[in-house]
Image (cartoon, coloured by chain):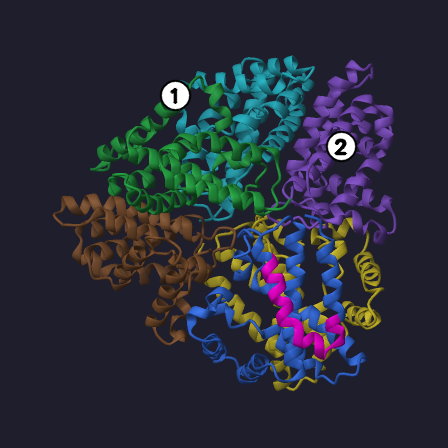
Chain colours: A blue, B brown, C green, D yellow, E cyan, F purple
Amino acid sequence: MPRSGWLFCNVSLSEVEDVAQHSFEVSAITLLLIDELERSGVKLDPQRALSMAILHDWAEASVTDFPYTALKYLGSRGLKDRMEQRALEDNLRSIPSGGRYLKLWQEYSEKRTPEAKLVHAADYISMLVQAIKYKERGNNSKELHELWQAVHEDLKPYMAEFKPVKDLVKEFDKRYSAISS
Amino acid sequence: MPRSGWLFCNVSLSEVEDVAQHSFEVSAITLLLIDELERSGVKLDPQRALSMAILHDWAEASVTDFPYTALKYLGSRGLKDRMEQRALEDNLRSIPSGGRYLKLWQEYSEKRTPEAKLVHAADYISMLVQAIKYKERGNNSKELHELWQAVHEDLKPYMAEFKPVKDLVKEFDKRYSAISS
Amino acid sequence: MPRSGWLFCNVSLSEVEDVAQHSFEVSAITLLLIDELERSGVKLDPQRALSMAILHDWAEASVTDFPYTALKYLGSRGLKDRMEQRALEDNLRSIPSGGRYLKLWQEYSEKRTPEAKLVHAADYISMLVQAIKYKERGNNSKELHELWQAVHEDLKPYMAEFKPVKDLVKEFDKRYSAISS
Amino acid sequence: MPRSGWLFCNVSLSEVEDVAQHSFEVSAITLLLIDELERSGVKLDPQRALSMAILHDWAEASVTDFPYTALKYLGSRGLKDRMEQRALEDNLRSIPSGGRYLKLWQEYSEKRTPEAKLVHAADYISMLVQAIKYKERGNNSKELHELWQAVHEDLKPYMAEFKPVKDLVKEFDKRYSAISS
Amino acid sequence: MPRSGWLFCNVSLSEVEDVAQHSFEVSAITLLLIDELERSGVKLDPQRALSMAILHDWAEASVTDFPYTALKYLGSRGLKDRMEQRALEDNLRSIPSGGRYLKLWQEYSEKRTPEAKLVHAADYISMLVQAIKYKERGNNSKELHELWQAVHEDLKPYMAEFKPVKDLVKEFDKRYSAISS
Amino acid sequence: MPRSGWLFCNVSLSEVEDVAQHSFEVSAITLLLIDELERSGVKLDPQRALSMAILHDWAEASVTDFPYTALKYLGSRGLKDRMEQRALEDNLRSIPSGGRYLKLWQEYSEKRTPEAKLVHAADYISMLVQAIKYKERGNNSKELHELWQAVHEDLKPYMAEFKPVKDLVKEFDKRYSAISS
């Protein structure tokens, strides 16, 4: 499944990131941030955070990546979450521990626990990584730049709460600005 | 924008049909069927039918191709149509004849006029053409076969109403069955 | 079938536009321009214009997209047209309305009626749209820039005759210039 | 980075799985198996198993996926491991928790703890999943079939030790055999 | 530049062989056959044969791969050769040894010397290799099978004249037949 | 087989050069340089140089393109050569002239004869050609620029020894610098 957001940034279908690649990146960033956060004094349950990172996009197997640009036509953000939840329930029905995964996904989508917040931060940071990749390949669309800025807006609360997130974002800002074009 | 249905049939992202290719195919099939239908005595407004074929998927520019498999999680088919209509309204706002196109799209989505029915038939026939292409390239997934049968179900009313549609479908049935695998 | 012109602009085979995508774009631009032209007082037969847009590249199914750069080695532009006409005759032989399509294609290739001129204008405008797309993805080849200028040369008579064509081209000029690189 | 094994099975470069997609699949399978194993009475540290799954191929970022077919020309299997370890040491030097990850990777490559064995089993199962995907797309190369059998050989000790692994492999065997061709 | 023949066999644009890959294969097959032919007593100038293999498709840099299916619409086979010769003359004008290459190309296209015949044989054998590759990936189109047979027809004189060519073709026949589907 | 070096320069898997394309380019550059070198008074055996160019990467069929970045983790450059030699020996065992090819490859890898030096120069020049291609498509990664400079370093001895190599490199330098970005 392609990550639809990049298609709106004029990334070609042959270069678009897919959901598996994205989920791996989010998991790897989560793993790295867990240690940084623990060092900076945040208490976390690593197992729950890692599990959440791995499964946060499983619903997209049957629902695909619902595009950001279409949210306003759907009625409410809540509906997208409900749709994904129903899909996930269906997919997990036959799996013995399905209920456990569903609960983890709900925790993720409610963004309240430190683990859920961390995975959301990793999700957004992974978009910065990808945007840098596309800019470095030459993409200079207005949409890519707007997405870069929107992601920063989304990252603000996590940068305020978690210092290692703030540090990492600043590092990526430097790399992004350094790309000539 | 990729046509999401094929991704569920294990077609790779590098081979998946996109919405522009699909829209061209639907338009070409519509053009061919208009003449056949006129010859068989059906009265049609060709301009309206061709316009509808060209614009029937314009909403997907901002909404992408909402997957068949996700419809049940959305609540109702009606919602998908409303979402597409809102997106189309937005996209067409700045275009002087936008209102005309929106009306054509509504006519299409209501499936009542002969022109709207013809374009729906062409839409489904285009899926048969594409399924044959993938089967011929080796795809033998269960999902492709199920999609082939679901499309036949969808085509039934149009095959009953329009003889040229029935003839064309039969021809494709022969080609599909002839593919060894 | 890939559109060969882009390959000479260093566009990779995995990103090159194909003939179906191009034909859809030409059809959509034709549809939009018909309304603009009618509003500006030009009299047109929409059905004929739309049909022409849909079928103008059908010959390429057996002849592929003969490259611009090779025209001079062929002897004459006339020969390319004759080759396409023979291919089209062959392809349409078994289709009851084949003769009608062939006549439309000839009208198109003679560039005399307003409908034929409109579709040629749409054909060139579609190349501007695509060039913008490639430039936005980073392509900064000399050949892309030369193609941009050659297409402008080809568009001149249509810009002089049809004000909406002129307006549209100016809009694309602005977008093209705005792309940093 | 492409997974080189599939290229020897005549999978095209445009369809070949990459290391990120593979690592995600291994992580997801590990997550699912952890619960099954715990239910069947095996004692595991989930955090360590998940971390290992996420990072088991990090060395390939600078070393790429060293091909199976080339192992015999390298001298010994041991050398490949040493090469990956040195690359990983280099990559992790600047990361505060780098030492922890290196230790996890070593644990993984020694295949002695239940966590390391689990991730190796998930690694092989992920290859079965991918082989099914390619077979379903039409691939009927001798090499794909041989790889399928070699992976089964590699899975034997894990099937003997972990019942959920055995059950999962049997399920995939059924799916593989069911693919006509 | 894609090799157009495969596109008519329903090979996707993302898997189609390009002219550089083909030229390498022809050169490698020529190299192997030179030794076999010398062993079987044929006298050859290896340098001329290898040079011819390397440059036999250079004209396609500006003319692309003119499709087999379009030859009949061009008037005569002779015209395709003249077109390629003019393109090559143009491309080689600025190169000091251009004249030498042009002469080698003419020798190739006249198919009279043993070296020219050998490279033509290698050209056709390379198509067998590629066809096997596509069949093994699942392609079961009628067109692929027809192309396989047409190439055999083209190879007949070379099989009759050169025993190593005959042996090689027989080997590929066995591999082709062994592919299930 | 993809050429791994470009993947480290952020070139996508769908645009990465493969070993066959590279080998063709090296062969074509070798052919052109042979004539230039002969004109400038260098004595060469063209047949041996062309054969070497065609076969210099045959080992990669079973060993893939071992990445530059991993050499330091392997122990020594010598080991990579030994690995390739063993693979080549294996691959050529069944071919009657296998011994001859192996000797040519050894001559190539020892870089002592003028023919071996020429093919190495062509190998590096082909990387310049490819780097220009990627830069022109928008790639502005630091790694591409570093690779450009490393290749120049590698070319130095050949530029000093062969004037036509020096001239060609200077020409490519101009083209590279002229690419805006």
Q: Which residue is mark 1?
A: C79
Three-letter amino acid code at the position of disc 2: Asp
Q: What is the number of callouts on the image?
A: 2
| Residue A118 percent coordinates (x, y) | 67, 77
**Chain containing mark 1:** C
Residue B72 or residue A153, whichever sits in front: A153
Residue C98 or residue F35, whichever sits in front: C98
Three-letter amino acid code at the position of disc 1: Leu
Residue D163: image quadrant is: bottom right
Q: Main secondary structure of the magenta part?
A: helix
- Tell me the SS state at disc 2: helix
Labels 2 and 1 positioned on one and the same chain: no
| Residue E180 percent coordinates (x, y) | 47, 48
Identify the residue shown where x is 64% and y is 37%. Answer: F20
- Tell me the SS state at disc 1: helix
Does residue F42 show up? Answer: yes
Does residue E43 show up? Answer: no
Highlighted range, magenta: A145-166
Q: Which residue is mark 2?
A: F173
Relative horizontal placement of residue F175, taking residue A64 as reference (left or right): right
